[in-house]
Amino acid sequence: MKRKKGRRLLLLMLIAGIAGIWTWIQAGEEEESFLGGLDRAFFKLDARAAVLVDAETGDVLYEQDGDTPYPVASMSKMMTEYILLEAIRDKRVTWEDNVEVSENAATAEGARVSLRAGEVYPLRDLYEAMAVGSANNAAVAIGEYLAGSTTNFAALMNQKAQELGLKSSQFVNATGLVYSYGQNQMTAKDVGRLAYRLVNDFPEIVELTSDPQVQLNSTGEKVTNTNLMLLSQNESLRVSGMDGLKTGFTDEAGYCFTGTAKREDRRLISVVMGTDTEVGRFTETKKLLEKGFSYR
């Protein structure tokens, strides 16, 4: 009799164990379905690569070719911003520092503000011109001021990339421009990781990048934000809570954008790389962010 009771007890325990394991598997499948890609079978962006990141946890909520290094264009300026903000925090430089602009910096191509070789400008003006207007000449001037030369600053960027856990990034300059000696490359996951560290370590960045326009104190020049999602009245481009972060474009990289938006207590970071049109990087960002905010 005791032997039969023992067998029944063992059978009940086995059934309970199997039921528990099944519940755990189902819960795991639901979690994987969400974190694994917001239903990839029905959701694909018209972009070379993309990721969506939870800005609180750093979890990658969605990825599309997230591990392949691609030219990253001016989104790499987020690394320049990070290194500068770190230097400000550590009191190695101040916003009031006067930076003499070299010929090399003054003649940088692409997006730019009015800087003359041999003249000095406040570090804050250079930062705002770079972060809001993506000014390449301002970025080069900042890199040279912090590290002494473009080459030295590129080495500093690569060192910081290792410290931040960016596993597949390579920097050759402060701007993301293409030169005979190469160009900056990052994976979408690395871009997302960099943006995650930037907005968490230096949350003041979004106070600047949410501004549609800034005026430089030294020259009076007005610099318009390259993030059209802040400026457009077109509902296809607007995202509630949008307040940053960085655009990028070269022929090799295509149109790129790292966006971030906050709704109530939740912030998301999106990365879209390699769309065919300027508007496309923003419409694909809207799709990604809206999809992300629809899940909790």
Image (spheres, rainbow, N blue to C red):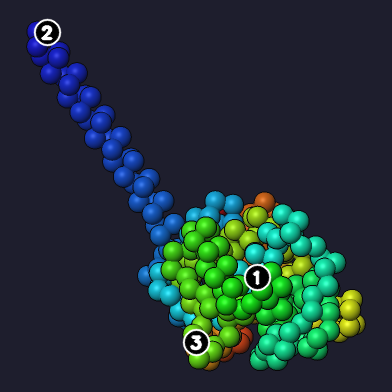
Crowdedness of circle 2 by 10 Å Cα count: few (<14), some, many (20+)? few
Q: Is residue 275 visible?
A: no
Check disc 2 and report the residue beneath it: 2
Residue 32 % position (x, y) = 38, 54
Three-letter amino acid code at the position of disc 3: Tyr
Question: 285 left or right of 12?
Answer: right
Check disc 1 and report the residue beneath it: 147
Question: 193 left or right of 205?
Answer: left
Residue at 73% x, 70% y is 209
Q: Name the mark nearer the viewer: 3 or 2.
A: 3
How many marks can you see?
3
Three-letter amino acid code at the position of disc 2: Lys
Q: Mark 1 or mark 2: which comes first in sequence?
A: 2
Residue 12 % position (x, y) = 21, 24
When asked about the image quadrant of residue 111, the answer is bottom right
Toward the viewer: 62 or 174? 174
Q: Which mark is residue 286?
A: none
Circle 3 SS class = loop
Residue at 52% x, 68% y is 158
Residue extending farthest top = 1
As drawn, 50 above or below 33: below
Residue 55 % position (x, y) = 59, 56
User: Whole-Å distance between the Cαs marked 1 and 3?
Assistant: 19 Å
Crowdedness of circle 1 by 10 Å Cα count: few (<14), some, many (20+)? some
Q: Which mark is residue 181?
A: 3
Q: Circles 1 and 3: CB distance less than 8 Å?
A: no
